[in-house]
Image (spheres, rainbow, N blue to C red):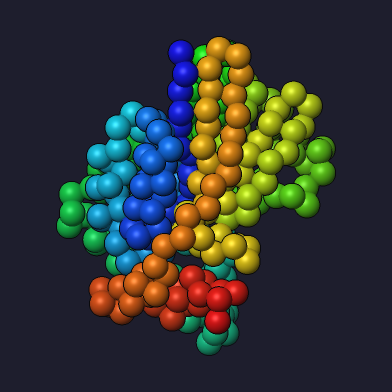
Amino acid sequence: MRMRAAVFSDVHGNLAALDAVLADAMGVGAEEFWVVGDLVAHGPHPATTARRLIDLPRSRVVRGNTDRYVLTGDLPSMIPSIDRALSTAELQVRIEAAMAFAWTRGAITAAGVYDWLAALPIEHRVTLPDGTRVLLVHAAPGHDDGPGVQAAMSDQQLRDAGLTDAGADLIFVGHTHLPLDRTVGDVRVVNLGSVSVPATAERRAMWTLLVADETGYTVEQRFVPYDIDAVTSALDQVHYPSADWLKAKLLRHIR
């Protein structure tokens, strides 16, 4: 038995980047699609992105922290709390973030995909043909938020984050938008980077090809170009709140 799975994270409502990834994945024979959270928020096409993911064959999809924010109205912990006096700049950040999540919630509700997003689990587990136990989770075992898995972490910090107690041999995460491939003890953790807004000088959409059979598995990080200018233009066309902030993230290191 041989399997080929496209594994990726942090799509963030960026339909153009997602379509580029899916085309590349299908072009190299991917038959399964594993998506590790942060699906719809911070992009111009949340509803169509959700529909594209729903229609994928043999898919496994987990939720990320921004998916939860869309559903609940919560805001990231890095945004200043309203229970203390805020500067004008801090208040503006809070207002824009709340508007962006509310806009996304309205879009997915109108499109009829709210219930699909709300039903997503925090993790998925898969066993590869050779017996390798795989965990798909957005940030770290048991968590869709927090510091996630970062290159600067020591092996002990990664153990403290639950990697070696997760009952998995291979863990796929996202969240930080920074790719990573690290082994701690007997556990390999792969941070998939981001389809939409990688936090690196590499601006192409990132995804990972997993090929597995009874003899073992391989992972290959892949990069796909897409039309970033079309995405920034779409932000204006759909009247996306915080469009200038998101354009800056998309265009970082380009201009």
Whether residue 102 is visible here, answered yes or no, is no
Judge left or right: residue 69 versus residue 147.
Answer: left
| Place of residue 215 in the rendered image (x, y in percent of width and height, measured from the top left) | 60, 14
Q: Quadrant of the C terminus?
A: bottom right
Residue 171, x across and y down, in percent:
60, 32
Of all residues, the one furthest to the front in this rendering is 27
Q: Which residue occupies 52% across, 53% down?
A: 223
Q: Residue 231: in sight, yes or no?
A: yes
Q: Nearer the viewer, residue 216 or 121?
A: 216
Above or below: residue 28 compared with residue 134: below
Residue at image coords 45%, 32%:
5
Q: Residue at x 45, y 23 (%)?
A: 3
- Residue 246 appears in which quarter of the rendering? bottom left
* Residue depicted at 59% across the width and 24% down the height: 217
* Residue found farthest to the bottom: 88
User: From the viewer's perspective, is 164 left or right of 206?
Assistant: right
Numbered marks: total = 0
Measured as percent of width and height from the top left, residue 74 is found at: 44, 58
Work out whether residue 17 or residue 109 is closer to the camera in this orientation and state it. Answer: 17
Q: Position of residue 51 (x, y in %)?
A: 25, 47
Q: Is residue 107 above or below residue 140?
A: below
Tell whether 166 sits left or right of 94.
Answer: right
In the image, 130 versus 178, the foreground residue is 130
Tell me which corner region of the image, top left, top right, bottom left or bottom right, holds residue 220: top right
